[in-house]
Amino acid sequence: MNPTPSLAQELTCGSAQLGVEITPEVQQKLLNYLALLQKWNKVYNLTAIRQPEQMVSHHLLDSLAVLPHLWLGHWLDVGCGAGLPGVVLALMRPEWTFALLDSNSKKTSFVQQAVIELGLRNVSVCCARVEDWQTRQCFNGIISRAFAETADFVTQTRHLLAQEGSWVAMKGAPEQELKRLPADVRVERIIPLQVPGLDAARCLVILKTI
């Protein structure tokens, strides 16, 4: 793919505003991923966002915005959909490992194809309901972008979280949701995010068990 200069420029400027450094090789792969998403979206309806320019802000930059607040480890992206934020994070952090999980086989088929075409060796893709899914190695971090209300997110994934691990929920305005958390889950931090080109409230909620 030869991306239009405007998309590359939007990604370059947006990542600079976020303070996230992207190598030319990774930037190309991010834009290749976007092109693949746009191609598959015509048939499989993977995302409601149709315009490539919007995909840069709503998908790539929205995912990149959380990166400075995450940590080295073994990660689960639950309800990964078309691979967001997991594919983006895996491209940016090849030394971390990621499992991308979704119950929609069309979406996981796309993600698996993206992983192959992008040469991602630090990603596994699973099609399953998270509450039924088991794995040998629990996760240092479990992230969700658009999976469920926060209380459901932590309840359905707690069997997959390592003892010292944390949940990370990408949210808009989560105040009401957080009032319904299980009694043994506490909010460690709420980090406001400013995503370039995205005119909506965004924050990152980091949670731990008490």
Image (cartoon, helix red, strand yellow):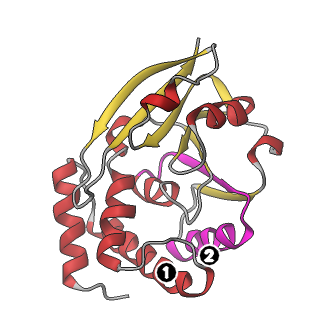
- Distance from disc 2 to disc 1, alpha carbons, whole Å, reads 9 Å
Residue at position x 51%, y 45% in the image: 96
Hey, which quadrant is residue 205 in on the image? top left
Question: In the rendered view, would you say 187 is above or below 86?
Answer: above
Residue at position x 36%, y 75% in the image: 31
Specify whether residue 134 is in view: no
Q: Position of residue 166 (x, y in %)?
A: 54, 27
Q: Are marks 2 and 1 in contact (CB under 8 Å)?
A: yes
Residue at position x 18%, y 73% in the image: 9
Please give the residue where the numbered disc 1 appears in the rendered image: 36
Please give the residue where the numbered disc 2 appears in the rendered image: 113
Which residue of the protein is positioned furthest toward the top in this rendering? 210
Q: Secondary structure at mark 1?
A: helix
Q: Is residue 182 left or right of residue 17?
A: right
Would you say residue 104 sits in the magenta stretch?
yes
Q: Secondary structure at mark 2?
A: helix
Q: Position of residue 128 (x, y in %)?
A: 78, 55
Q: Position of residue 109 (x, y in %)?
A: 68, 73
Residue at position x 59%, y 61% in the image: 81
Q: What type is the residue that disc 1 sits on?
A: Leu
| Mark 2, other Cα within 10 Å: few <14 / some 14–19 / many ≥20 | some
Q: What type is the residue that disc 2 sits on?
A: Gln
Q: Is residue 82 left or right of residue 112?
A: left
Question: In the rendered view, would you say 181 is above or below 39?
Answer: above
Residue nearest the viewer, comparing 146 with 188 = 146
Q: Which residues are magenta?
A: 93-118
Question: In the rendered view, would you say 189 is above or below 20?
Answer: above
Q: Is residue 82 left or right of residue 197?
A: right
Q: Position of residue 84 (x, y in %)?
A: 50, 58
Residue nearest the viewer, comparing 62 with 115 = 62
